[in-house]
Amino acid sequence: MKTSEILKESAGDLWNKYTRHEFLQKMKDGSLDINTFRYYLIQDSKYVEIMLKSLLTASNKGPIDKVSNILSIIFETRDKGMEVHSWLLSKIGITHEEISKTGFSVSNYAYTRHLYYYATLGWDYFLASWSPCMWGYYEIGTYVKDSPNELYSKWAEFYASDEYKKRVDAILDALDSIQYREELKIPFIDSVKFEIKFWESALNRVETDIQ
Amino acid sequence: MKTSEILKESAGDLWNKYTRHEFLQKMKDGSLDINTFRYYLIQDSKYVEIMLKSLLTASNKGPIDKVSNILSIIFETRDKGMEVHSWLLSKIGITHEEISKTGFSVSNYAYTRHLYYYATLGWDYFLASWSPCMWGYYEIGTYVKDSPNELYSKWAEFYASDEYKKRVDAILDALDSIQYREELKIPFIDSVKFEIKFWESALNRVETDIQ
């Protein structure tokens, strides 16, 4: 069995809680409150910044072929991602200034520093902590993309796209080149838990008081 | 004005919320539920481990005289601290196995990775993020030490002790040798907020599902 499959299986029911969360069911049927999505999008923008920083921190600790493959695909497909992202921000009226002025929810702060922490420990740990986000969002995109709400369907179409799938394939290829070991489970499963908390924080629009 | 004083002042009312929290008022009058304290002590033990790891991570980035002074005092007074800590663990029936099996609350996880994150960024940042814990606990020890509850008074006596004060003095001496700059406020104030969340998580005994 592939390392990625063992890890996903080890998360058990949590994987489904993450990729079929109430937040996503509501995106899919179009009933998600736009202010909940707005909250999510700001937190997600803050997340991506530290996620990238963590990837770069980990990148000098991995095998150069796998790392280069991932980085080149991420940067190749970055324009497309930014295009959708900027379109969403402008549609919803979120400025970059608002994103930077808004704090992190505690769980988003914990999640981003969790990625960074594992990035300093090693490439394998980082990949295990990072893959739930990248992999899960492809499944989520496919699930949500037919939403009757244009904002939600556009958002989802990107994650369901071939471009995005290339990223996921490169990451899973790198992860599967690592021999499975027990200690990779903790970063992976904790990240799945943080993804669930990410949706929940948005649904409850919890306080964002950490800078 | 000293850098430490500017930072404390910048936290405003939050400092008081931290050092005179309901949790501490209840320790002082002896009414704090022992299971709440038990929860706290396990989380605190987990915190200290990553705090030390962060200190060591930051230690190669600071001026060698200040760093050496802090490390030598921390290790000199470590036995005394461990003695009180072990006494408390045994009185309350907490084993090291239980500490390592119990997960982190989200805010404790966020707080510990916050220290670690700043430790990788630089010594000044780390000191700013670390000092609220060390400095605040001296004030807290002094506040709580006359508690009628023996467990709480012993706990507090350590933080109110001259040995502990030496640690605080060394840290504040290092912090005050740094010229104040605006960017030190964020790590400092966020740590004060995390300290408040630490008490609140214990009072509410929130879920500890992050490894």
Image (cartoon, coloured by chain):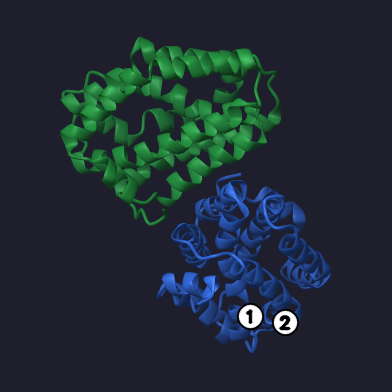
Chain colours: A blue, B green
Q: For the residue carrying disc 1, how many other residues have a C-alpha within 10 Å: few (<14), some (14-19), or many (20+)? A: many
Q: Position of residue A143 (x, y in %)?
A: 58, 85
Q: Nearer the viewer, residue A126 or A154?
A: A126
Res A34 visible: no
Which of disc 2 and disc 1 is earlier in sequence?
Answer: 1
- The chain identifier of the residue carrying mark 1 reads A
Residue type at mark 1 is Gly
Give the alpha-carbon distance from disc 1 to disc 2, as whole Å.
8 Å
Residue lying farthest to the front in this orientation: A179
Q: Is residue A191 left or right of residue B198?
A: right
Q: Is residue A120 above or below residue A14?
A: above
Q: Is residue B187 above or below residue A165?
A: above
Q: Is residue B54 above or below residue B143?
A: below
Q: Identify the mark at residue A161; answer none if there is no mark.
A: 2
- The chain identifier of the residue carrying mark 2 reads A
Q: Is residue A93 above or below residue B42?
A: below
Q: Position of residue B68 (x, y in %)?
A: 56, 15
Q: Which residue has dot 1 on it? A: A141
Residue B148 found in image quarter: top left
Q: Is residue A35 left or right of residue A59?
A: left
